[in-house]
Amino acid sequence: MLRKHYDDDQLAFGEASHTFIAKQIHPDYLAWEQAGIAPRELFTAAGAQGLLGLQIPEEYGGGGTQDFRFNQILDEELMLGGVGAAGLGLSLHNDICLPYFLHYCTAEQKRRWLPGIASGELITAVAMTEPGAGSDLAGIRSSAVADGTDLIVNGSKTFITNGINADLVIVAVRTSADKHRGLTLVVLERGMPGFERGRNLDKLGLHSQDTAELSFTDVRVPAENILGEIGTGFASLVANLPQERLSIAVAGVAGARAALNWTVDYVRERKAFSASIGSLQNTRFRLAEIATEVDVAQAYVDRCVIALNEDDLSVQDAAKAKWWCTELQGRTVDTCLQLHGGYGYMLEYPIARAFADARVTRIYGGATEIMKEIIGRSLKLN
């Protein structure tokens, strides 16, 4: 089916993204996978190319657009290019962290932070998950106690994407015992005394994406680094979750399409029993199923992006997109790896890396089970 989702400006941006990935990521990507981290220079190079801070006003060096389709086409190119692990850091910076700075910063904070976010000189992260609190935001225990106008922060976070590279970390802390109105967002900056990074976690996949443990010991956070108002952190986090989950869905369906593309190319060439694997009925049927599911999911995700642009994307619809597309991604890469045979298990083939990378997408941003619970509650069954 012909996809008419993008206009000429977005298609041109997609071409620029494709060229950037080919020149700036592909040559060194496997080395980054071995190192367990992408270099900071990836962010400054992306910033120089105009790929960061797409929604930041032009006066601060950003793209000045509110159309999420630009974010979407960049995310798709990263997944189709087989560099989703390194690309996750860029997507987190653009799609997930940036809205907090745009929506909740004061004018002074915008002047201080937005230019660096747009240029890639200030890499961002958001720290919600703790050793004892994942999808349940109300379970956050990291604390912030007032000392004059400052806050003294103690606690720890884990599984933090961009955790090693980040210069600005949006941290959810508890400022009172109230389950929801007791959370506040603060921005911790690289070099603050008492703010420490643990090890770069050794993960099943996403190897070139740095994921870290963070700890806070009597970190003094000035009032100028409080994001929004005291006690509004839970509402701020919930308000941004639909875009976060849609970003994951975009990457999920693009990851499935990438796996399909690689496998179609492979089975056309690979021979078995004197014929191409693609000529076998089982191969045709399995790939026909995947092609259909990917196109159907793509149509839903595209509609969700338009709804987000119109400020009309519901929590429930974002949850539907997130769980469906990540589960589709998992099914697809598994099937496609099987069709690659033994070569699919070799990390030199992108399908093997995609298989490992895809597993976590059903967990982060809210596990599949949480997404189903959100949707189920909206049906008002009891």
Image (tube, grey):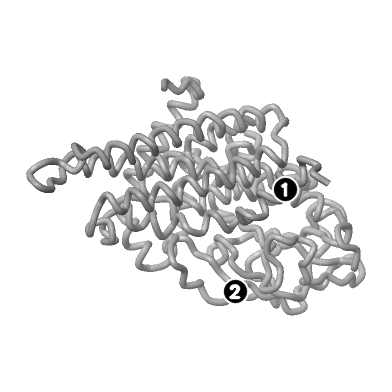
Amino acid on which disc 2 is placed: Arg
Instruction: Identify the mark nearer the N-term, 1 or 2.
Output: 2
Residue at x 50%, y 52% (from the top left corner)? 88
Q: Secondary structure at mark 1?
A: helix
Label drawn at residue 197: 2
Residue at x 24%, y 55% (from the top left corner)? 341
Amino acid on which disc 1 is placed: Ile
Measured as percent of width and height from the top left, residue 64 is found at: 62, 32
Label drawn at residue 374: 1
Residue at x 50%, y 38% (from the top left corner)? 50
In this view, the residue farthest toward the left is 274
Q: Is residue 195 visible?
A: no
Is 331 left, or right, of 114 in this rendering?
A: left
Mark 1 or 2, closer to the camera: 1
Looking at the rendered image, the quarter that the N terminus falls into is: top left
Is 225 left, or right, of 331 in this rendering?
A: right
Measured as percent of width and height from the top left, residue 159 is found at: 59, 67
Q: Secondary structure at mark 2?
A: strand
Q: Give the camera-side residue of 260 and 211.
A: 260
Question: Compared with residue 190, is residue 362 higher up or lower down, i.e. above or below?
Answer: above
Question: Compared with residue 22, is residue 211 higher up or lower down, i.e. above or below?
Answer: below
Question: Compared with residue 241, is residue 279 higher up or lower down, i.e. above or below?
Answer: above
